Amino acid sequence: MGWSKSTETRTEIDEVTGLEYPVTENKYVLGVELLGATLAVSGGLLGLSLAFRKPARPDKQPGAETSST
Amino acid sequence: MKHCQKRKLAWALALSVAPSVLSAGPIKFDFKDPKKVNNVVFLLDAPLESINGTATGVSGTVSFDPAKPAATTGKIVLATPSLHVDNPVMKDHMLGEEWMHASKFPTIEFVAEKMTGVRTSETTTTATIAGKLTVKGVTRKVSVPVRLTYLKGLLAKRNRVPGDLLVLRCDFTIKRSDYGINAGNKEEKVSDEIELKLRVAGAAPH
């Protein structure tokens, strides 16, 4: 996987001369830097969600007794 | 047939072929190609990154004599802004001031001056061609291997115009440090050696 591309180049052959030549088409191809950025953003969001999570209420903690009046 | 008549016939034949014999000589091939088949491929293989791209802005003329291929001379010009890589950011950097500075140096030129080691077999000639290569305003003498294929009469098949084609293939390597292309910098990502593959065909309409 390489960098992102805004064009894609393929090779064709000229029938008369036998020369190989490039044909370029506009086509967006996702690259490794976007994958990295996506992972970084999701990691950041995960970190934020852990940092700002609500503390668990005592009565919701496992093993806590319930009392009734 | 009498001896006199034979002589007249021989003269008539000689005169009829004379124009073609007299007109034989170097043929001028034009390498401007609106179909963008003519191209240069460039490859850079650095330890951290491999870059490959193309350029199709080829023009120039070559004088080629099928009877004397060793006398071939000419000039091939490549428009610097036609250099292309698929990554848009990399392309901007490549054409920018730090690297190719395409706005200041809009052409890359090769002037062919002398051919040596010429070998011809049927329509194909191989040789080493000595000339001057100018990149980013720096001109250096180079000797590169070349393969020329003379395709007599095949222009009609390609462009619907009677004439000949000359196909030129040439693979060689240059160093960007020799031409002041951000010399000595970022060699871990952009190698010093640039492999070039020239694939061009010139047309000579009759």
Image: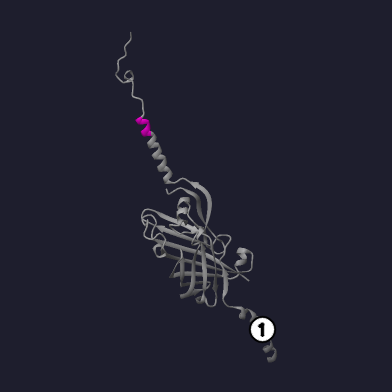
Question: Alpha-carbon neighbours of circle 1 within 10 Å: few (<14), some, or many (≥20)?
Answer: few
Q: Could you tell me what secondary structure mostly forms the magenta stretch?
A: helix
B134 lies left or right of A53: right
Rendered location of residue B99, percent (x, y): 43, 58
Q: Does B201 sit above or below residue A28?
A: below
Res B184 quadrant in image: bottom left
Rendered location of residue B72, percent (x, y): 51, 74
Instruction: Name the foreground residue: B151 vs B37.
Output: B37
Colour mapping: one colour
Rendered location of residue B70, percent (x, y): 50, 76
Rendered location of residue A14, percent (x, y): 55, 61
Q: Does B192 sit above or below residue B119?
A: above
Q: Which residues are magenta?
A: A46-51
Check residue A47 for magenta coloring. yes
Tag 1: amino acid:
Leu
User: To which chain does the residue with label 1 belong?
Assistant: B
* Residue linked to disc 1: B15
Q: Secondary structure at mark 1?
A: helix
B61 lies left or right of A56: right
Instruction: Name the foreground residue: B15 vs B74.
Output: B74
Question: Considering the image in quadrants, where does the C terminus of chain B appear?
Answer: bottom right
Question: Considering the image in quadrants, where does the N terminus of chain B appear?
Answer: bottom right
Instruction: Name the foreground residue: A12 vs B102.
Output: B102
Q: What is the residue that sits farthest to the bottom in this orientation?
A: B3
- Number of dots carrying numbers: 1
Check residue B170 for magenta coloring. no
Res A47 quadrant in image: top left
